[in-house]
Amino acid sequence: MQPILFPPAAEFERWRQTNRAIEALFELRESSLAHAAPQVSGWPALAHVAHLELANELCLRNLQSFARREGLLLQRDTQPNEQTLALLARGVLPRGQAKSPRMVVPPVDVELDMVRSWHKDNVEALTELARNAHLITSSELTIPHQVLGPLDAPQWLRFAVVHTRHHLTIALEVLSALGAKPAELPPLPAL
């Protein structure tokens, strides 16, 4: 099977689009973001956004390591498996099958201002990385994902986009289940 490529310029743009959807969520009432809809998810919408901001911070750090071509997690000569590449190409993560690692589980008392701050920091880091998109290339370097296995730089970028969209989808479903009207919710960017 020929490797599936994820052009960094397109993935950076998709990530920027998902960030705009997150920023639109921040404009909703904090109380609506703070309630769970157990029939959809045990986490409220704000917890999903907090989780993805924590995860995206780690993704950005990995991408910074790839750009510098140095970092403790970098490995050489490991290959992603075909199922992982196909999953990333489809752009849809299975729901309810993976447990979030403890380091990216949102705090119980998550606050909107705190999540906005994390988001702002991530947007700044993403902007800086996107300026150097030419450094995000396929190579012999990979960093292992705890479930998906070794991923190279463009694959980590694609994972960040797919994972962000995954949790945005759930957050929007939670808000809909709580009575939000479709016109009140931001559209999800296409993959």
Image: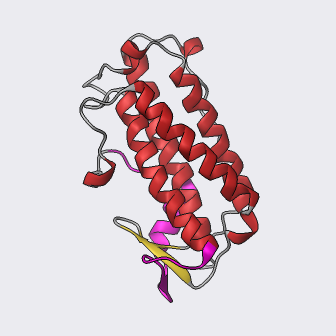
Query: Residue sitting at 51 percent across and 66 percent down?
Result: 62
Q: Give how far across and how far down residue 103 sits, in percent.
A: 30, 53
* Residue stretch rendered in magenta on the structure: 68-95
Q: Quadrant of the N terminus?
A: bottom right
Residue placed most toward the observer, 138 or 38: 138
Q: Looking at the image, which residue is at 67% across and 58% down?
A: 129
Residue 8, x across and y down, in percent: 70, 61
Residue drawn at the location 40% of the way across and 37% of the way down: 50
Q: Position of residue 47 (x, y in %)?
A: 35, 33
Q: Is residue 101 left or right of residue 143?
A: left
Residue 164 lies in the magenta stretch: no
Residue 91 shows in the view = no
Question: Can residue 12 be seen in this snapshot?
Answer: yes
> Is 76 a magenta residue?
yes
Task: Determine whether 173 is above or below 165 in the image.
Answer: above
Q: How is the image coloured?
A: secondary structure
Q: Position of residue 136 (x, y in %)?
A: 67, 68
101 lies above or below 116: below
What residue is at 60 percent from the left and 52 percent from the top? 125
14 sits left or right of 174 in the view:
right
In the displayed structure, does residue 3 sit left or right of residue 25?
A: right
Nearer to the camera, 180 or 46: 46
Q: For this view, does 37 lie left or right of residue 25?
A: left
